[in-house]
Image (cartoon, rainbow, N blue to C red):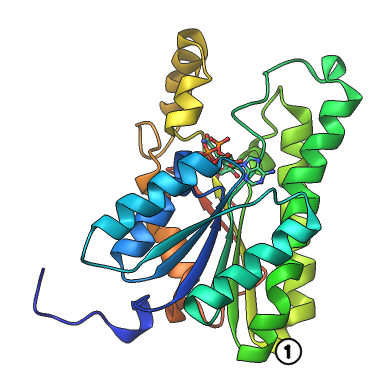
Amino acid sequence: MSEMETNPLFDLGGRSVIVTGGGTGIGKVYSTALAGAGANVVIADIAAKEGEAVAAAINADEDGGKAISVATDIADEPATLAMAATAIDAFGSIDVLINNASLMSVLERRPWHEIEVEEWDRVMAVNLRGMFLCCRAVYGQMKKQGRGKIINISSSRFWSGAPNRLHYSTSKAGVIGLTRSLSSEVGDDNIAVNAITPGFTESETQLASSTTQYLQGQSDRYRARAFKRAEQPDDLVGAVMFLASDASNFITGQTLNVDGGENMH
Ligand SMILES: NC(=O)c1ccc[n+]([C@@H]2O[C@H](COP(=O)([O-])OP(=O)(O)OC[C@H]3O[C@@H](n4cnc5c(N)ncnc54)[C@H](O)[C@@H]3O)[C@@H](O)[C@H]2O)c1
């Protein structure tokens, strides 16, 4: 480690950060990287065993921040309230909420008219109602603190209109509406609400749930990008850290696209 201190604008040391869906995939990478930067991380995932494993790995490292795992179904209001209460008990504050959990890799890729109504409703319940409930659960504490950062994970499908998983794409477009409108309601509380739109990212879960043929189709798409390679979970970490840090204090209601220059806006 360099002797040079982190510029205070980018310093996440001691910040209390909730990462929903922090037990697997990209959320696991966020949790680990944030703890590595000194943040105390609350991993709120419905996949309890995976969340525990990530927290244990973080706590086994003497450097950086600490972590706890709270088994949470974000679609369930009492569970989100318990998540917030546990975070405050453990770390004394909630500085950042990263709304990363969603139903994505578990969804079959099918034409829109083959999506069952029940599956459509469940996607909305997790991806949109769940995000609303998590924001609501942390709001009281952030308001009391006089500051907070909410980072909502959307998808570059919002820009590209990619086919299949229409329910998922629709929910991720809803995330942008939620981000913009909520930001204008909580600005007076000094709470920033921003969104990130990742491109197709080779998370462990995305890879495991995609056929070789589908992945080949994706790699053909990279040729149309400014940066001609596949997106990795690590490519998203800097954007999340920036929006979590004081360096972004006057940015709110915005959507930061991180897809290697495939979509430009
Ligand atoms: N991987 C990609 O290509 C890609 C692209 C654009 C956006 N995203 C978004 O990035 C985020 C992470 O992606 P990923 O590839 O790791 O996805 P993923 O599907 O692998 O992971 C989602 C996480 O959310 C958790 N989760 C699911 N339902 C939950 C619930 N009800 N309550 C709490 N946790 C729940 C899962 O257990 C998992 O840990 C998601 O919001 C996804 O939509 C991913």
Q: Front-most of 98 and 140?
A: 140
Q: Position of residue 2 (x, y in %)?
A: 9, 72
For the residue with label 1, is its CB less than 8 Å from the closest atom of ligand 1? no
Q: Front-most of 190 and 229?
A: 190
Answer with the quarter of the image where residue 231 lies: top left
Q: Is residue 260 above or below residue 84?
A: above
Q: Is residue 41 left or right of residue 97?
A: left
Q: Is residue 101 above or below residue 225?
A: below
**Disc 1 packing (10 Å; few <14; some 14–19; many ≥20):** few
Q: Is residue 222 above or below residue 188?
A: above
Identify the residue at horizontal 72%, vertical 66% (top origin): 81
Q: Secondary structure at mark 1?
A: helix
State whether residue 42 appears in this view.
yes
Q: Type of residue at label 1?
A: Asp
Q: Is residue 73 above or below residue 251?
A: above
Seen as rendered, the residue at the extreme right is 117
Ligand 1, by image quadrant, is top right
- Tell me the quadrant of the picture where the N terminus can be found: bottom left
Identify the residue at horizontal 87%, vertical 20% (top origin): 116
Seen as rendered, the residue at the extreme top is 213
Identify the residue at horizontal 77%, vertical 37% (top origin): 123
Q: Front-most of 34 and 211?
A: 34
Q: Front-most of 111 and 217?
A: 111
State whether residue 146 appears in this view.
no
Answer with the quarter of the image where residue 188 lies: bottom right
Q: Which residue is mark 1?
A: 188
